[in-house]
Amino acid sequence: MAEEQAAAGTKEQQQFALQRIYTKDISLESPSTPAVFKKQWQPQVSVDLGTKSEKIDEGGNYEVVLTITITAKVENETAFLIEVQQAGIFFVTGFGAEDLRRIVATAAPNILFPYARECIDNLCVKGGFPPVMLAPINFDAMYQQALAQAQSGQPAADPATH
């Protein structure tokens, strides 16, 4: 028992902490304005989502970037295109490689998502369009899907970088 406690004492303590949240890039394009405002507003909306992570120092800090691109088309014309890169610096230490990948691919984007969603909503309204309220995203399911694709030999991005 004393040996187990001694071994546990030498094991690095697991820590996951948010250091900073920031908007890395943000854009709104509305190439069909003002003509699009005269059309019946029944847009076809597509949402593209991606995450990437990078170790930024030897102290255990990682930058995680959540990129969301929204494209709204009315009668095959682009009403607007919004892209937001919401980023954060996260301190992660004491985890194995697999757990680390899971944390930066799921927990960190879950923290960043509400900030990105708010930016998108604000850009829509400021651009003269109705707000876009994105539904919650299950980053855990996305991570599991990416892992399954990687294991089946299908070409897929690294699960930590969707």
Image (spheres, rainbow, N blue to C red):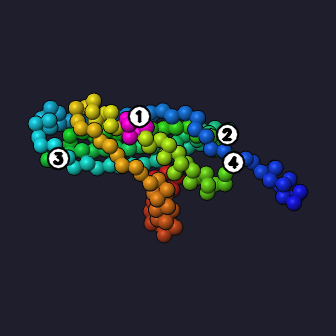
For label 3, the residue is 42
Can you tell which of label 1 and label 3 is closer to the viewer?
3
Going 48% across and 32% down the picture, which residue do you hit? 22
Mark 3, other Cα within 10 Å: few <14 / some 14–19 / many ≥20 = few
State the image coordinates of residue 118 (x, y, percent, origin top left): 38, 37
Disc 2 crowd, CA 10 A, few/some/many (<14, 14-19, 20+) = few
Structural distance between the alpha carbons of marks 1 and 4:
31 Å
Can you identify the residue that label 1 sits on? 25
Q: Compared with residue 7, is residue 29 higher up or lower down, i.e. above or below?
A: above
Where does label 4 land, which residue?
14
The numbered mark at residue 58 is: 2
- The part of the chain drawn in magenta is 115-119
Query: In the rendered structure, does residue 52 fall within the stretch colored magenta?
Result: no
- Which element is circle 1 on? strand
- Between circles 1 and 4, the one closer to the viewer is 4
C-alpha gap between disc 2 and disc 3: 50 Å
Figure label count: 4
Between 4 and 29, which is closer to the camera in this rendering? 4
Earlier sequence position, callout 3 versus callout 4: 4
Residue 150 falls left or right of residue 75? right
The quadrant holding residue 92 is: top right
Task: Specify which label sits upstream in the sequence, 2 or 4.
Answer: 4
Tell me if mark 4 has few (under 14), some (14-19) or many (20+) residues whose alpha carbon lies within 10 angstroms of its own: few
